[in-house]
Image: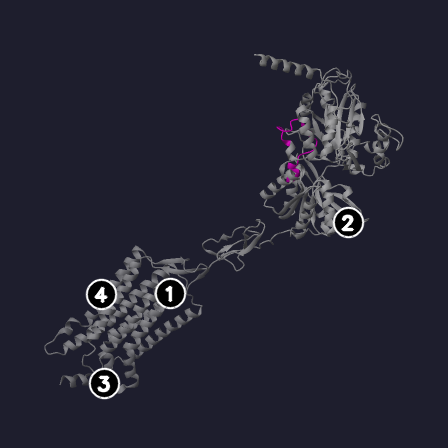
């Protein structure tokens, strides 16, 4: 119990002591560079100097305050425009009519250490009433700054717990759009989300798909480059390398320069802050790395301090995004006269001290700029500071319930959070005509100019506007680029090329190289039957089934239709032999007709001989139906004509064979077989055998007739126009029936080969049937294996060969006797051998 009471007593004493604590600054106070008192205070943080001089940290004495050198003219002008806008508002009778605005502007020296020190000095103030208790309230209402994203992140995180609104004029890192971490941050410029997108538009519009990328190793560079790389990947743009460095890292800078030197990319996207860009340009100049097309960002693309005799060789022709240049009326006169007379704390170079007891020597480097204003027309960020000051003023105007003639309620206490909410609601137009408002992320609408470094006739560099990007316009109107007005790297008038692989021409496709970006590829010719009719095609398209690719593989052309034609050599030869067969058959028929009364003609059944010659003529002629373009009628005709004519031919040969056998039987005593196979029976047998084939053909044509067919399977590049069999059963039935008759005829002729006669026709029939059967047996495998029109040629060859075999084997010996041995063409000679043998 005693321990508990002691603990309560201890907490009570601590609480009482804390409540009575007065405010005091630990360490030396940080004084502003420029200041003025007012009813309400606006802070400003600008890197007026660019080099920070660190004190000694040996811990043998109290460290001195940080000091800076090397005036950064651009941000000194921004401090001036802030004061100019405040003085303009203080003179206004409508905006905060009876309220004066004061300011405290600190120099951050472009250092993260200095920005922290300046922020604490700005939030705490320098003077405290003796005995004044600490209430946790900052003496200022808003802060304008910082210029770079990384210091702005530090600033916003430091002021965030106190809900002091921070309005930046140029910090564009997308990371600052996160309202969870930066709820009181605003900016009069758009985030780098839009700048990264606009950069991708430039690169894609110019057809550059192979790039190098360099960025500052800070929030501005890292976030901006990450967003650009993401958008570039979505657009199919490849990045050969992506390097980063910071201004205090010479080893990383050396690595970046070495990478650029070794790379093949001719275009470099430099998402780099100004200090890093100056270092990079110096190193590229030292190593004489020129001819590269630089794509820049707003932080450096229009900075004149980068223009030196050496840098022109590196940056000449650079292309990039710049914030819009808006002239503020009266500002140029202000920086020459009024600022130095009223706002500058030390008008003389020596002998005077400011209200903070600082030596005027601190301002000596600034006094050198007293009569210089040639840079003012090129100041692109001045209007953004101007907008930021007016945004605070309009917010205060609404919070203080200002009325034009009655003034403002000066007794109201404004909490920082109230000002944050009021800033979200601002919506006004400044005197330049620009509309000011903040979106849900605290940013403004994106509006950029596309500028080009161009050298005029006098040799000086000008930043020429060659396009724009305006996110407030419809999507199809946001980006415009006038390429005809651009001077490229090295002063060239032709756009540089930057590719990993040359474009694949029509007829080829892109094939990715293993382990390399998609922009690195090989050009592979399209396969047979495929085409690509555009440049850089990812895939080849297969031609429709009746088309084939041309030699260049860039167009589908109709496939060559292949069939046995009358005009080609093979067709001409087959026609020749067909007509030769017809001619020889006709000559034999004429010879037989002229010698029809001779014994040799009579002995060989002249009626069947003439019918056989007629059928052979049809066999020779039917081969012609296989030549030429297949049609529906020609397909049906060729197979049926072939089948019927050959059956007619074999039927005649079979009839002659039976007659020979019957004639021998008739010579035997008491035989009367000839009356059963006389001329009438011979005609009927030929007719009966032929009618069976006719019936088979009719059934074939009725059930599934042959028809023209485009065969695209055998030759992919050609269409074989052939006659499909329709019913294969019908086709093989026709061939089978011919073969059956041929085999029967061959057997009968073979049986009659030894019959006694001086001129035994059965021998010749046997030999002709052997040739016939051999031809058609060898025809089957040849027919099946022959491709395209050769299938038809094989069939014609079989028809002609078998027809010539019948013609020569049966009729050649008789023609020989008639023409060359007429003495044997007598009745006695025909029966002499028979008589002698029978005796």
* Mark sitting earlier along the chain (2/3): 2
Q: CA distance from mark 1 to mark 3?
A: 50 Å
Tag 1 residue: 786
Q: CA distance from mark 2 to mark 4?
A: 110 Å
Is 183 covered by the magenta stretch?
yes
Can the viewer see residue 136? yes
| Element under disc 2 | loop
Within the magenta stretch, is there residue 546?
no
Q: Position of residue 236 (x, y in %)?
A: 58, 45
449 w.r.t. 508: above or below: above
* Nearest-to-viewer mark from 1 and 4: 1
Tell me where residue 159 sits by quadrant.
Answer: top right
Q: Is residue 106 left or right of residue 579?
A: right
Q: Which mark is residue 310?
A: 2
Residue carrying label 3: 826
Which residue position is annotated with label 4? 688
| Numbered label tally | 4
Packing grade of label 1 (10 A; few <14, some 14-19, many >=20) is: few
Q: Earlier in the sequence, mark 1 or mark 3?
A: 1
């Amino acid at each position: 119990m005693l321990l508990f009471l002691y603990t309560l007593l201890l907490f009570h004493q601590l609480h009482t002591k804390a409540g009575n604590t007065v405010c005091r600054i630990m360490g030396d106070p940080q004084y502003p560079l420029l200041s003025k008192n007012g009813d309400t205070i606006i802070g400003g943080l600008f890197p007026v100097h660019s080099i920070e001089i660190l004190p000694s940290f040996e811990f043998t004495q109290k460290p001195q305050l940080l000091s800076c050198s090397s005036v950064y003219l651009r941000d000194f002008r921004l401090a001036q425009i802030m004061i100019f806008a405040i003085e303009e508002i203080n003179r206004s009778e409508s905006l905060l009519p009876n309220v004066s605005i004061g300011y405290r502007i600190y120099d951050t020296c472009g250092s993260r250490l200095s920005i922290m020190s300046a922020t604490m000095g700005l939030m705490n103030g320098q003077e405290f009433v003796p005995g004044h208790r600490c209430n946790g309230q900052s003496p200022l209402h808003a802060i304008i700054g910082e210029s770079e994203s990384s210091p702005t992140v530090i600033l916003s995180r430091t002021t965030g717990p106190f809900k002091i609104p921070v309005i930046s004029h140029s910090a564009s890192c997308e990371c600052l759009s996160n309202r969870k971490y930066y709820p009181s941050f605003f900016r009069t410029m758009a985030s780098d989300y839009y700048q990264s997108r606009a950069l991708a538009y430039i690169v894609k519009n110019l057809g550059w798909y192979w790039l190098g990328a360099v960025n500052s190793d800070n929030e501005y560079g890292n976030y901006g480059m990450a967003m650009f790389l993401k958008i570039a990947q979505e657009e199919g743009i490849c990045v050969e390398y992506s390097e980063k460095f910071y201004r205090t890292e010479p080893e990383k800078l050396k690595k970046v320069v070495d990478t650029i030197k070794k790379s093949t990319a001719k275009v470099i996207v430099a998402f780099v802050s100004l200090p890093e860009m100056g270092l990079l340009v110096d190193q590229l100049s030292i190593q004489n790395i020129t001819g590269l097309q630089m794509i820049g960002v707003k932080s450096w693309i229009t900075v004149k301090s980068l223009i030196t005799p050496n840098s022109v060789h590196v940056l000449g022709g650079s292309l990039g995004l710049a914030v819009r240049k808006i002239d503020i009326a009266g500002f140029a006169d202000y920086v020459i006269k009024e600022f130095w007379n009223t706002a500058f704390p030390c008008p003389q170079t020596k002998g005077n001290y400011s209200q903070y007891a600082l030596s005027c020597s601190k301002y000596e480097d600034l006094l050198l700029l007293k009569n210089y204003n040639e840079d003012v027309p090129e100041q692109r960020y001045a209007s953004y500071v101007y907008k930021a000051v007016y945004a605070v003023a309009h917010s205060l105007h609404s919070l203080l319930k200002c009325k034009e003639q009655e003034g403002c309620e000066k007794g109201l206490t404004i909490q920082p959070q109230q000002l944050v909410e009021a800033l979200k609601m601002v919506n006004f137009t400044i005197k330049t005509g620009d509309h000011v408002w903040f979106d849900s992320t605290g940013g403004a609408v994106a509006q950029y100019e596309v500028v080009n470094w161009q050298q005029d006739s006098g040799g000086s560099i000008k930043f020429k506007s060659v396009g724009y990007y305006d996110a407030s316009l419809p999507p199809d109107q946001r980006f415009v680029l006038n390429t005809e007005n651009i001077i490229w790297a090295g002063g060239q008038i032709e756009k540089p090329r930057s590719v990993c692989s040359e474009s694949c021409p029509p007829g080829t496709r892109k094939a990715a190289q293993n382990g390399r970006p998609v922009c690195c590829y090989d050009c592979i010719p399209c396969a047979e039957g495929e085409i690509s009719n555009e440049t850089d095609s990812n895939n080849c398209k297969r031609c429709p089934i009746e088309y084939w690719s041309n030699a260049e593989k860039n167009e589908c052309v109709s496939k060559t239709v292949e069939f046995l034609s009358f005009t080609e050599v093979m067709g001409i030869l087959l026609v020749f032999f067909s007509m030769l067969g017809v001619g020889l058959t006709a000559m034999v028929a004429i010879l037989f007709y002229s010698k029809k009364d001779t014994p040799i003609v009579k002995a060989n059944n002249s009626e069947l001989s003439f019918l056989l010659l007629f059928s052979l003529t049809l066999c020779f002629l039917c081969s012609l139906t296989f030549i030429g373009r297949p049609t529906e009628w020609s397909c049906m005709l060729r197979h049926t004509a072939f089948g019927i004519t050959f059956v007619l031919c074999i039927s005649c040969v079979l009839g002659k064979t039976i007659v020979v056998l019957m004639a021998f039987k008739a010579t035997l005593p008491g035989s009367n077989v000839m009356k059963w196979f006389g001329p009438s029976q011979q005609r009927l047998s030929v007719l009966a055998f032929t009618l069976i084939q006719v019936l088979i053909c009719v059934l074939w044509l009725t059930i599934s007739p042959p028809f023209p067919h485009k065969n695209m399977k055998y030759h992919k590049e050609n269409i074989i126009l052939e006659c499909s069999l329709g019913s294969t059963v019908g086709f093989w039935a026709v061939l089978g029936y011919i073969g059956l008759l041929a085999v029967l005829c061959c057997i009968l002729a073979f049986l009659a080969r030894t019959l006694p006669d001086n001129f035994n026709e059965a021998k010749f029939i046997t030999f002709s049937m052997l040739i016939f059967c051999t031809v058609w047996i060898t025809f089957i495998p040849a027919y099946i294996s022959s491709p395209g029109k050769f299938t038809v040629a094989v069939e014609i060859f079989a028809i002609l060969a078998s027809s010539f075999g019948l013609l020569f084997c049966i009729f050649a010996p008789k023609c020989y006797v008639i023409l060359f041995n007429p003495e044997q063409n007598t009745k006695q000679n025909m029966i002499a051998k028979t008589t002698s043998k029978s005796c």
